[in-house]
Image: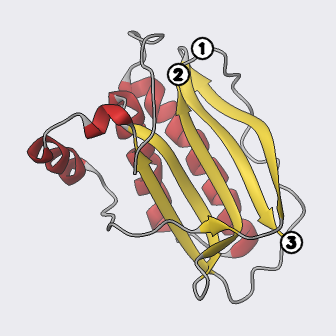
């Protein structure tokens, strides 16, 4: 669970900005719910707030939401959001998903990785951050991509020089 995240471009990136970006992620998740019935609507605000808190503090590397084959721990459909403070992101409209995919029999799953900044904290500081989050996560092995699939990139959500880039993976 490691990654890199540079936080130089956005001294003015506030929790309000982070919640705006988290709201865009939440809009994608509501569309996912409308198309596939998951994630549960009552969890979407928690996921959006988790993104906002971690993004604002520079502790988010990536977060994935999607549907996986539990027997092989591989993604069938995945939305991946990668934190960035490059200042080069554009703010896209939520949505723009590929054509619907048959996800019958696949379970909803979410996986998160923390930034290198998070891993520089003491274990008690890390635990304190995790306690403030609305989503309780367990340690485990993140699903991998299947042997064949398509990744679509080029979508991002940003405000004041920081945000997330999104890619969509669909297994064949």
Q: Which mark is residue 172?
A: 3
Residue found at x 45% / y 64%: 43
Q: Is residue 53 above or below residue 169?
A: above
Q: Earlier in the sequence, mark 3 or mark 1?
A: 1
Mark 2 burial class by Cα count in 10 Å: few <14, some 14-19, many 20+: many
Q: How much space separates mark 3 and mark 1, taking CA atoms?
A: 34 Å
Q: Which mark is residue 162?
A: 2
Q: Foreground mark, 3 or 1? A: 3
Mark 1 burial class by Cα count in 10 Å: few <14, some 14-19, many 20+: some
Mark 3 burial class by Cα count in 10 Å: few <14, some 14-19, many 20+: few
Left or right position of 20 against 105: left
Q: Is residue 1 above or below residue 68?
A: above
Q: Foreground mark, 3 or 2? A: 3
- Residue at the limit of the structure toward the front, as seen here: 147
Q: Position of residue 120 (x, y in %)?
A: 24, 34
Q: Evaluate if marks 1 and 2 touch, with contact meaning CB atoms under 8 Å apart.
A: yes
Residue found at x 66% / y 55%: 79
Q: Which residue bears the numbered disc 1?
A: 87
Q: Earlier in the sequence, mark 1 or mark 2?
A: 1
Decide which of 49, 8 is in the foreground and name it.
8
Left or right position of 31 against 47: right
- Give SS at disc 3: loop
Q: Position of residue 164 (x, y in %)?
A: 58, 34
Q: How much space separates mark 3 and mark 2, taking CA atoms?
A: 33 Å
């Amino acid at each position: 669970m490691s990654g890199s995240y540079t936080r130089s471009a956005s001294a003015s990136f506030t929790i309000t900005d982070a919640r705006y970006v988290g709201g865009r992620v939440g809009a994608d998740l509501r569309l996912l719910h409308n198309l596939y019935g998951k994630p549960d609507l009552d969890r979407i605000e928690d996921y959006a707030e988790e993104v906002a808190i971690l993004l604002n503090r520079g502790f988010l590397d990536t977060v994935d939401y999607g549907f996986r084959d539990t027997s092989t721990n591989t993604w069938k459909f995945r939305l991946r959001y990668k934190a960035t403070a490059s200042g080069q992101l554009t703010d896209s409209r939520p949505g723009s998903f590929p054509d619907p995919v048959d996800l019958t029999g696949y379970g909803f799953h979410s996986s998160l990785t923390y930034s290198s900044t998070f891993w520089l904290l003491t274990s008690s500081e890390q635990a304190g951050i995790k306690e403030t989050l609305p989503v309780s996560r367990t340690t485990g092995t993140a699903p991998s991509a299947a042997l064949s699939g398509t990744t679509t990139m080029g979508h991002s959500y940003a405000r004041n020089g920081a945000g997330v880039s999104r890619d969509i993976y669909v297994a064949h």
